[in-house]
Amino acid sequence: MLASASDTATASAGPLVPAPFRLLAKRRETADTWTLELEPRHGTPLEFAPGQFTMISRGGCGEVPISISGDPDEPERLVQTVRAVGLATSALCEAEPGEVLSVRGPFGTAWPLEEAEGADVVIVAGGIGLPPLRGAVLRMLAQRERYGRLVLLYGGRAPDQLLFGEQIQQWREQGLEVLITVDSAGPEWIGHVGVVTRLIGRAGLDASRVLAMTCGPEVMMRFVVATLADTGVQSDRIHVSIERNMQCGIGVCGHCQLGPVLVCRDGPVFRYSEVERWMRVREL
Ligand SMILES: Cc1cc2nc3c(=O)[nH]c(=O)nc-3n(C[C@H](O)[C@H](O)[C@H](O)COP(=O)(O)OP(=O)(O)OC[C@H]3O[C@@H](n4cnc5c(N)ncnc54)[C@H](O)[C@@H]3O)c2cc1C
Ligand code: FES
């Protein structure tokens, strides 16, 4: 598609000015979660690193931070997986192909994929915490030889809440070890039942080789960190992605402050040892 002069101007206009992105396709993941595939109307691919997020909005329904769940090696498609929990996220999930959404970014820090080279990488995700890690999984599988074991431990509330079912099967075939658990399930579920931390013991980890990445509800991440520490993983080898309410996304408004850091600018991905004491502070 040809870019108009105003689209091109918007694309180069700085981090507070949104750029128009056309919704190409949407895929339902669960009852309340959709994956949106967008393309920039200005035609410039949105290069990003796995772990980064955009500030995205539809119409006047509010702008929200959403992680990029797409493949970092395919930046011409912006892929984001959104769970409808309120006004802005519901509006995004209701958008129809052809519509134009507003996007700023990408912003924030990335998963430490270079530091992870040679390590056994353990990814622990809870619920909607898997999309922010999806780009990291895709990149590591594309460069499989650079890593030791690649292990995904994934927990959801129920079987019908699990994301990316078919893709996870493909990832298994590409060399990702996957253990899945749900909080509760009917008799038709033959997998694990229980909290995701229980999978850590089942994974047979050599703590001295582990680099861990985790994303999910904060309480889950605290238990994940504690369980990894019990198995001997150092807190500076554990990386967490933190959520806080955001407005500017670029370290200006102070909304996302966590102790001395701004989550949008200094995170959302942090080495756990750097934010350990501040993660005990509840968001107001
Ligand atoms: C860096 C970052 C990455 C994120 N990535 C994703 C993603 O990939 N997919 C996705 O679906 N969501 C993601 N989120 C969460 C998403 O931004 C919130 O769900 C969204 O802001 C809610 O806005 P709303 O107007 O729809 O709902 P609101 O009406 O604002 O809130 C509805 C409910 O969600 C809770 N809530 C609102 N904002 C947050 C938040 N930031 N964290 C936790 N709970 C919140 C509220 O307390 C309330 O209970 C991310 C958040 C951050 C900070
Ligand atoms: S959202 Fe404004 S400083 Fe982080």
Image: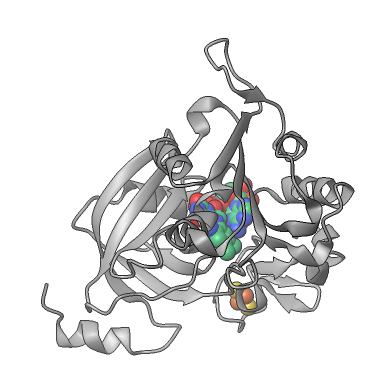
183 relative position to 61: left or right: right
In the displayed structure, 86 sits above or below 161; it is below
Q: Position of residue 181 (x, y in %)?
A: 63, 30
In the displayed structure, 131 sits above or below 106; it is above
Q: Residue at x 65, y 72 (%)?
A: 115
Q: Residue at x 24, y 50 (%)?
A: 96
Q: Nearer the viewer, residue 198 or 11?
A: 198
Which of the 4 image quarters holds residue 243? bottom right
Q: Nearer the viewer, residue 125 or 175?
A: 175
Q: Position of residue 103 (x, y in %)?
A: 38, 70
In the displayed structure, 156 sits above or below 63; it is above
Q: How is the image coloured?
A: one colour
- Res. 272 visible in picture: no
How many numbered discs? 0
Please, which residue is most extreme toward the left here?
2
173 relative position to 200: left or right: left
- Res. 201 visible in picture: yes
Q: Position of residue 264 (x, y in %)?
A: 61, 73
Q: Residue at x 29, y 51 (%)?
A: 95
> Which quadrant would the N terminus be assigned to in this image?
bottom left
Please, which residue is most extreme toward the top here?
187
Which of the 4 image quarters holds residue 57? bottom left
> Which quadrant would the C terminus be assigned to in this image?
bottom right
Q: Residue at x 73, y 56 (%)?
A: 210
Q: Position of residue 205 (x, y in %)?
A: 74, 46
157 relative position to 43: left or right: right
User: Which image quarter has ligand 2?
Assistant: bottom right
Please, which residue is most extreme toward the front here?
145
Q: Nearer the viewer, residue 151 or 3?
A: 151
